[in-house]
Amino acid sequence: MYYAPYLALKYLRYYLTSSNGKGHGTHSPFIFDFITKVLNDNSPYKEYKQAEGLRKRLLSDSRMFIVEDFGAGSAVLKEQERSIKSIARNAAKSKKYGQLLFRIVKYYQPATILELGTSLGITTTYLSLANPASKIVTMEGAKEIAAIAKLNFRQLDISNIELVEGNFDNTLPDVLKGTNTVDFAFIDGNHRRIPTENYFQMLLPHLHNDSILVFDDIHWSKGMEQAWETIKNSPDVRCTIDLFFIGIVVFRKEFREKQHFSIRF
Ligand SMILES: C[S@@+](CC[C@H](N)C(=O)[O-])C[C@H]1O[C@@H](n2cnc3c(N)ncnc32)[C@H](O)[C@@H]1O
């Protein structure tokens, strides 16, 4: 992981060099739509309240429990005592990105969604509420955390989520064996170069023209930046959108030339 000051410098560079996020001068209809109808959609969707209600509840839950710490990666498996609120504070995507993921799913309506890294299920809740007709498979290695996420889904009466427990290295191949196509995937766990590249390779045969992948923390470390470059250079990838804290990958053939965008968000 990069030191905070270095990451801040990187963010500053992104902020100064990325396009302004208004869509002016954009020739690609896909990107124009993405910017104007998804990225900058400021509607106060009622579902936001439900997901943020869950976050609020978890942020005030001081109960402690022992968790297997998968940390950034999963090489070292140690156990440590954590409070629910510290996990909610440190692991979940923020409101801003949770709501962006909600809008992506609401706009493109993917039928099959995968999430690598459930944690307490805050982002999964956003994904589910964005398209209740979708089938969501979310994956989590720490069984104590997975148990709380399952309880959260039950309490919110969400029924389109299947939570698969175990290390992605073991569970992802099985999940994909039972899945024809993946329309949308959020890869938000095990932020290391080789595992991230491997998950991308495993997902590739299941993707199609309209599939969208979102990778978390693409600038978090040298390894993640290398993985992001590998993904950008993959011949199947037609377009990428770098929002600094997440990277979006698009496979649409309408992009005859590969295009990489960095957009301020
Ligand atoms: C950043 S959190 C996910 C946050 C969640 N997507 C959200 O926004 O609410 C990453 C999760 O991935 C899990 N994880 C990390 N590496 C894993 C692996 N190799 N197999 C299974 N789970 C893993 C961790 O236990 C952690 O709960």
Image (cartoon, helix red, strand yellow):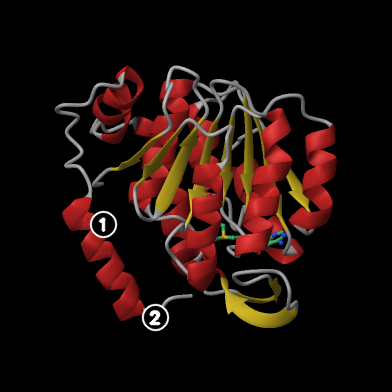
Element on which disc 1 rests: helix
Residues packed near mark 1 inside 10 Å, few (<14), some (14 to 19) or many (20 plus): some
Residue at image position (73%, 42%) is: 202
Can the viewer see residue 160? Answer: yes
Between 56 and 220, the one lying in front of the other is 220
- Determine if the C-beta at disc 1 is less than 8 A from ligand 1: no
Q: Amino acid at mark 1?
A: Tyr
Above-or-below relation of 88 to 155: below
Between 169 and 156, the one lying in front of the other is 169
Q: Which mark is residue 14?
A: 1
Q: Position of residue 175 (x, y in %)?
A: 80, 39
The residue pinned by badge 2 equals: 3
Residues packed near mark 2 inside 10 Å, few (<14), some (14 to 19) or many (20 plus): few
Split into quadrants, the picture shows ligand 1 in the one at bottom right
Is 111 placed left or right of 259 in the picture?
A: right
Q: Position of residue 6 (x, y in %)?
A: 32, 76
Element on which disc 2 rests: loop
Q: Amino acid at mark 2?
A: Tyr
- Determine if the C-beta at disc 2 is less than 8 A from ligand 1: no
Q: Position of residue 44 (x, y in %)?
A: 27, 33
Residue at image position (65%, 69%) is: 73
Name the quadrant containing residue 173.
top right
* Chain-order first, disc 1 or disc 2: 2
Q: Which mark is residue 230?
A: none
Q: Position of residue 63 (x, y in %)?
A: 58, 74
Above-or-below relation of 180 to 145: above
Between 96 and 181, the one lying in front of the other is 181
